[in-house]
Image: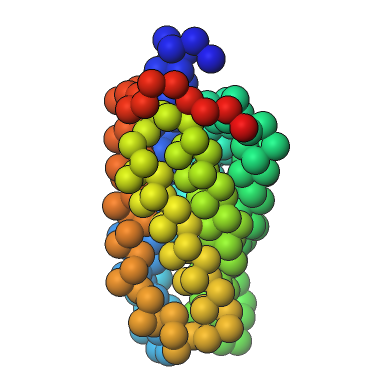
Amino acid sequence: MHTHLITRTARAAGALYAVIIAAGIWSELGVRARLIQPGDAEATWAAIGAHLPLLRASIAADAVMLLADVALSVLLFALLRHVHREVALTAMVLRLIQAAIIGASLLAPIGVVLLANADVTDPARSALFLMELHGAGYDFGLIFFGVNTVLTAWLLCRSGLVPVWLAGLLGGAGLVYLAGSFTRLLAPEVNALLQPAYALPLLAETAFCIALLAGLPRHRAAPRAA
């Protein structure tokens, strides 16, 4: 790929990544973490009722995030396919699978919004269940994203487009996503201990976003093709 085209593609990918990070953090930490009271259905339902427009906005933000993620997966494939086409294609497909799973899981908070005007015997318990189901679906989708991130890190390491340390950070982030998602499914008590480790993915993905926005300045003389 021509250097000028690499820079344009990278900056477009960086802009999309910034949208993904901002929308994802705001939806998860800025909205859902404030509304959900684990184990307390009534408090959760009361918080949702008091902030229903905010919940609607978070669903819209997640939809924007997923649209950006689909576009980003295509741009990253374009940037990295010269390294190893099959691995780059696999990484793109895995990221798209993640987007599909998280998109499907958004039906759960949409169901919570519908509960506000529904004739349901116990809306509070239903709302808490649906919000927890959404969280579980999100984590399940991150299994595919974790593998995607590891593959992307490998491709970046071989490409010469980023420093090796940044590729290593991304590889570590992928392992954190995998460990977090599998422990949520198989060992919830261990999952609680892993929560501080999610600082690594935030650091790695933010650093990668910045590198993309900078046009991916090369740190090695030439990329190594597979």
Residue that appears at 41% across and 38% down: 17
Rendered view: 108 above or below 4:
below
- In this rendered view, identify the residue nearer to me: 127 or 171: 171
Q: Where is the C terminus found, in terms of image quarters?
A: top right
Write down the quadrant of residue 106 in the picture. bottom right
Q: Position of residue 75 (x, y in %)?
A: 54, 28
Display colour scheme: rainbow
Q: Is residue 224 above or below residue 87?
A: above
Which residue is depicted at the point 39% across and 82% down?
192
Side (left or right) of 141 relative to 195: right
**Residue 222 seen in render:** yes
- The answer to whether 163 is drawn above or below residue 47 in the figure is above
- Expressed as whole percent of the image width and height from the top left, the position of residue 33 reads 35, 69
Please, is residue 69 above or below residue 117 in the view?
above
In the image, residue 163 lies at what x, y percent? Answer: 33, 37
| Residue 193 placement: quadrant | bottom left
Between 53 and 30, the one nearer to me in the picture: 30
Residue 74 visible (yes or no): no
Q: Which residue is pictured at 42% across the width and 25% down the height?
A: 10
| Numbered-mark total | 0
Name the residue located 45 percent from the left edge and 53 percent from the top edge.
171
Residue 5 percent coordinates (x, y): 47, 13
Residue placed most toward the observer, 42 or 139: 139
